[in-house]
Image (cartoon, grey):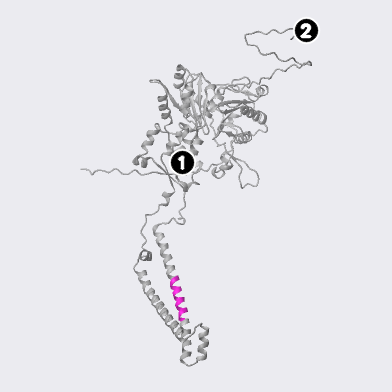
Amino acid sequence: MAAPTHAKPPVCQIFTFNDPKTSPDPFYELPAACLSQSPVPIVIDNGSFQTRAGWAVPSGTASSPPGAGLDSPRLAARSETQIGNDIPSLEPLRWLLKSQFDRNVVVNFEIQELIFDYVFSHLGIASEGSVDHPLVLTEAPGNPLHCRQMMSELLFECYRVPFVSYGIDSLYSFNHHNLQRNAVAPHTGIVLSSGYNCSHVLPVINGRLDAVNCKRVNIAGSQAAAYLQRLLQLKYPGHVAAITLSRMEELLHEHSYTAVDYQQELEKWRSPEFYEREVHRIQLPFSGKVPGGVVSVEERQERKAQQLRRLQEINARRREEKLHQDQERLDRLLAVQELLEDGLLEQFHKSLVELNMDSAQELQSYIHKLQLCVEQGRQRLQVLELEQPIDEGDGKSPVSVSCGVALQPVFNLAEYHQLFVGTERLRCPEVVFQPSLTGEDQMGLMETLQYVLDRYSAEQQETLVSNVFLTGGNMLYPGMKQRVERELLAIRPFQSHFKVSMAARPSLDAWYGARDWALQHPAAPGTEGWVSRQDYEEKGGEYLSEHCASNLFVPLKIVKPAPSVRSSEPSAPAAPQQPASVATVTAPSDVPMVTS
């Protein structure tokens, strides 16, 4: 009969931070496929977290340097700018970082120009004064006309590009996904995009963006990382400096997940067994040297023993010195007493005056006291000399014999430098659905989706929810697709159908979709989606040629007031206003009018 097997307690897994050090991006040479007579377009996914750039060739791939940060090193003798992966570590210089974005809209075009310089030089463009390649660039949904005007001015005036095409990154990803599954165009669906600064709900009808019903939620990955940092810093106030924003982003990317049912998942974490099995212990780096005040029990006892021995030596030295002083004083008093015994009264009285004594009886009293002190001091020294070999030979620590120190549990220094990440793994991704967790007074992503759907008819809603597409770097959490399906099941009517799909590469599909569009629509004057230099000069910098992944172009109409005709004669007072249904008849100017 086999012996019963007992379930072993779960072994907790300990993780460590990678703290990757970025290496500078290489300078690529111009590919052979780009040396043809027709210039090959450059595709730039201008994101607020990472900028991805590459050539629009069938086998092209995107290089993705983080292009959101610029900094000037403090130790540089002159002004020097570092961009993207040229910054080895962000945390020491995070307070110096600058971005071209305000949320998801480009507003700082001086930094944007530096980003373009960095991209073009690393792609191998060596032409001076111009970039002779068409450019496909992503922009924010509902990008303001002024921001597009400034971007077009930068590209056409500074870089002298021949053509520019603007599109929305999430719509590029949506079209790339439909192209991969061979869906029949035009496509209809609704895109849920969540990036670094913002999340969007973008309805697409018959292959075109319904810009009137687009909505933005100002909660995304950066808010989740800041929320996680705040939670862990409050939980571990002793490790505030080690809980950096870069490490929190690493925790979000590698250790967080989206709960399908948030409240039910929190209830699971109340179980001690579930907590021990699911908690992630993150080991912080620490020094093996024990800091002051944080020592083991053995070292603490040894230190106390050393201190006790030093105290004993100091006390013994002081006793010997005091005994020597008392002996010298006793010898001097005995010498004065011998003067009295020898009959030298005059010298005896002089010595009493020097000793500040009045009579021989007082001298005898001092001699008696000093004799007792000297005798007691000699006895104490003899006792200490006898006890010292015993303490050294019995193997017991003087601390345990004399002080009676109780044993304490051993302090685990490595465990002290561990972060126990439990419910924070699901609480931080939840801010996309419940922004109130961070104190934001706005709707979550699914509430915004319901609000957008309610603006359509029932038939249009059925068509839209049949193709719900998730994209963006903040959609990479495990369980995100299942959570959206569960929320849609609660939103939609009973027995209604819907389909949720996720981008194959939520962070990269926007670039690949823009590349696909550039390959399908070669740049040429009058081609849909491309803005030529002639269009820029004739129609203004805010002009946009619409296509399947672009914003809706609404030109800014400035109504000029009609010029007023000034007459030399003074004008008559205005007649009182008449009701709209009553017609007023005015007399000709040459007919005199009589008024009473």
Residue 159 image-quadrant placement: top right
* Three-letter amino acid code of the residue under disc 2: Asp
Which quarter of the picture shows residue 539? Answer: top right
Q: Which mark is residue 588?
A: none
- Locate the N terminus by quadrant: top left
* Image height of 545 relative to 44, above or below: above
- Distance Cα–Cα, label 1 vs label 2: 85 Å
Q: Position of residue 411 (x, y in %)?
A: 40, 53
Specify the label residue 590 is tagged with. Answer: 2
Q: Is residue 245 left or right of residue 577?
A: left
Q: Which of 323/166 is in front?
A: 323
Corner quadrant of residue 500 = top left
The 10 Å Cα crowd at callout 2, few under 14, some 14 to 19, many 20 or more, is few
In reply to whether residue 479 is colored magenta, the answer given is no
The one nearer the camera, 285 or 331, is 331
In the image, residue 93 lies at what x, y percent?
Answer: 57, 44
Instruction: Report the number of discs.
Output: 2
SS state under label 2: loop
Q: Which residue is disc 1 drawn over?
A: 231
Q: In percent of the image, x 61 and y 46: which residue is there? A: 74
Q: Identify residue type, mark 1.
A: Leu
Q: In what element is the residue under mark 1? A: helix
Give the residue displayed 62% in from the left and 41% down from the top. 81
Residue 17 visible? The answer is no
Contact check, label 1 and label 2, Cβ < 8 Å:
no
